[in-house]
Image (cartoon, helix red, strand yellow):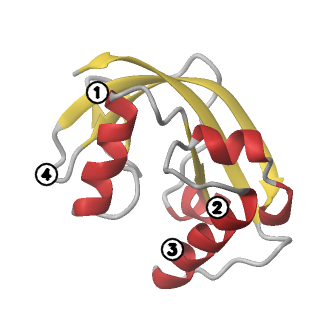
Amino acid sequence: MWPRVNGMRALELGTSGEMRERLNALVLAGRKTATTGLPAEYVEETEGLEFAGERLALLGNDGEHVATIEITGVELAPFGGVTWEHAAAEGEGDRSLDEWRTGHSRFWAGVGTPVVEETPLVCLRFQLVGPS
């Protein structure tokens, strides 16, 4: 089960360390308004999908509550079906959908979960409600 902060489910972006710091900074700057995950993580953690209107506590490296976000959309899509609109909303500087796919494929392979075109994904859209 994911941690809870002030009654909200928590969201930890990327992996701990520099990656999480960078992704959280993008959220705080308003440049990152989307993220993508694997449904298997929800099963492993016995969690349901987020829903529009749900607020989440964005956590930093030490588990500190750095911001609150509100989910504005949830979509299930295969890895090969993720749109450029969603990829660009992740705000990570990808210049094309191919670049996004390469980077995300590399990330998931690096954490032991390689993806293929048909791998299902959870695509979340969100807005920053405010710092913690």
Q: What x and y, as percent, mark residue 32? A: 48, 36
- Can you say whether 16 is above or below 115 in the image? above
Give me the C-alpha separation between circle 1 and circle 3. Answer: 24 Å
Residue 126 sits in quarter: top right
| Res. 6 image quadrant | top left
In the figure, is residue 96 to the left or right of 125?
right
Q: Which mark is residue 100?
A: 2
Residue shown at the point (51%, 51%) measured from the top left: 93
Residue at mark 2 to residue at mark 4: CA–CA distance: 28 Å
Q: Residue at x 57, y 70 (%)?
A: 103
82 vs 69, left or right, is: right
Residue furthest front as drawn? 95
User: Which label sits in the foreground, 4 or 3?
Assistant: 3
| N-term mark: 1 or 3 | 1
Q: Which residue is denoted by mark 3 in the rendering? A: 107
Q: Earlier in the sequence, mark 4 or mark 1?
A: 4
Q: Residues within 10 Å of mark 4 (few under 14, many from 20)?
A: few
Q: Earlier in the sequence, mark 4 or mark 3?
A: 4
The residue indicated by pointer 1 is 67
What amino acid does circle 3 point to?
Answer: Phe
**Amino acid type, mark 4:** Asp
User: Residue beneath label 4, please?
Assistant: 62
